[in-house]
Image (cartoon, rainbow, N blue to C red):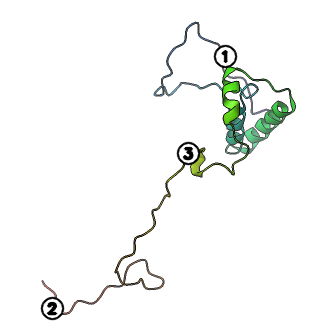
Amino acid sequence: MSELTRRYVVMALATAAPFDPADREGVFVLKPWKDPAALRALATYRDHCYPELARDLDAWIRAIQAGPTMRGDVGRRNEPHVRKGHAARGPRGAGGRPTAPSHPQAKPTSRPPQQKGSRHPVRRKRRGRRRR
């Protein structure tokens, strides 16, 4: 049985309405035949879903890639910004934006070195009596 099924009817509204990001039942429609960024998003989704759906999505992606190049309005605007492959991207899909390192380099300190096999710094023994 195919995992890709038609479940919704999508049609254009008579007038444009604002998108509500808080609507938990809201949908965002991508057209991978007309938008190269949508095709990349579909491929990413395929790479992160269960195997049966991934197989069906892969067949759809191959059909799109083998077919004629068609661009809609958004697809024409997205085309110059679509990157080929993941090598040019930063961590977590950051795109071309520069990212700060996740952990800044430690500044040199005068702390004693750590013992091998321990995460805790070496502590000097206290001299004298313990307080009660």
Q: CA distance from mark 3 to mark 1?
A: 36 Å
Location of the C terminus by quadrant is bottom left
Mark carried by residue 97 = 3
Q: Is residue 125 left or right of residue 50?
A: left
What's the residue at 59%, 26% (across, down)? 28
Mark carried by residue 107 = none
Residue 79, percent from left and from top? 71, 31
Task: Please give the residue where the numbered disc 2 appears in the rendered image.
Answer: 129
What's the residue at 72%, 23% (across, down)? 6
Task: Please give the residue where the numbered disc 1 appears in the rendered image.
Answer: 9
Q: Based on the displayed image, in which of its 4 quarters is residue 84 positioned? A: top right
Of 132 and 59, nearer the camera is: 59
Q: Based on the displayed image, in which of its 4 quarters is residue 97 positioned? A: top right
Q: Amino acid at mark 3?
A: Arg
Q: Amino acid at mark 1?
A: Val
Q: Are marks 3 and 1 in contact (CB under 8 Å)?
A: no
